Amino acid sequence: LGFFMAKKFVAEGAEVLIAGRNISILEESAKKLECKYLQLDVSNPSEFDAFMDKAEELLGGLNVLVNNAGISLHENTFFDVTQETFDKQVDTNLKGAFFLTQTFIRHIKNTETKACVLFVSSETGDTMDFRPYGFTKAAINSMVQGLAYLFAKEGIRVNAVAPGVTRTDMLANLPKELVDRISAEIPLGRVGEPEDIANAYLFLASDMASYVTGLV
């Protein structure tokens, strides 16, 4: 999803910087996208200030943050959840997103920049779940509305998109029969494409959404 978002933003003329843990994937993706990149582990907030300083330098300023990093460990049952799997998902999906956003807003707060923070939520954030992944997405939904209210008067908009089943690499590993069954249960008759999700983020990041905040 992050790759397709960046591709869409670059195509529309944005200055884009992508980040992630795997340096070889970053270098390859940045070359394809013709954008900048920095290595970052979002589960390690101690890196955030230095990262934001460097990102600001490379981009010549900051006005949009997309919190896209996320993991799901797909525990099969409630009893398969361990403290380790719980912490890994909370640290990346929730704690990392919270403190990266805090760092971003602190950097732009006194610049009078009209800014936008976007999160990747999930349909699981609005349904019952027994796994940490769903809990983190429910918390993201709450955070979006709280931060939107908190920073609205300062011109900082905060929104999220909550994709359903989308055709990512993870979906490609599922049997075709299962994907067909999932598609049949979706009213539009198909799973989402990465471009569908990227289009929603492009709208929310753009001036066309200047009156939209606190939306999931």
Image (tube, rainbow, N blue to C red):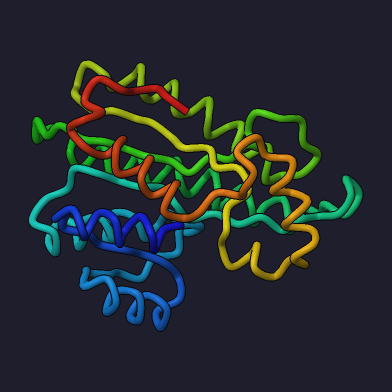
Residue lying at 74% horizontally and 65% vertically, measured from the top left: 176
Q: Position of residue 10 (x, y in %)?
A: 21, 60
Question: Which of 49/188 is in front?
Answer: 188
Which residue is at a point 91% across and 49% down the rendered structure image?
79
Q: In the image, is residue 110 above or below residue 198?
A: above
The residue drawn where x is 21% and y is 16% is 153
Is residue 7 toward the left or the right of residue 175 in the image? left
Image coords of residue 23 (percent x, y): 39, 79
Q: Quadrant of residue 167?
A: bottom right
Q: From the viewer's perspective, is residue 5 above or below residue 162?
A: below
Residue 198 position in % (x across, y down): 38, 49
Q: Residue at x 17, y 48 (%)?
A: 62
Q: Nearer the viewer, residue 171 or 184?
A: 184
Q: Is residue 88 above or below residue 143?
A: below
19 vs 25: above or below? above
Of the pair 126 and 87, the residue shown nearer to us? 126
Quarter of the rendering containing residue 6:
bottom left
Q: What is the number of callouts on the image?
A: 0
The location of residue 180, given as percent across then percent down, is 74, 55
Q: In the drawing, does residue 97 fall left or right of residue 110?
A: right
**78 or 197, nearer to the observer:** 197
Q: Is residue 192 left or right of residue 172?
A: left
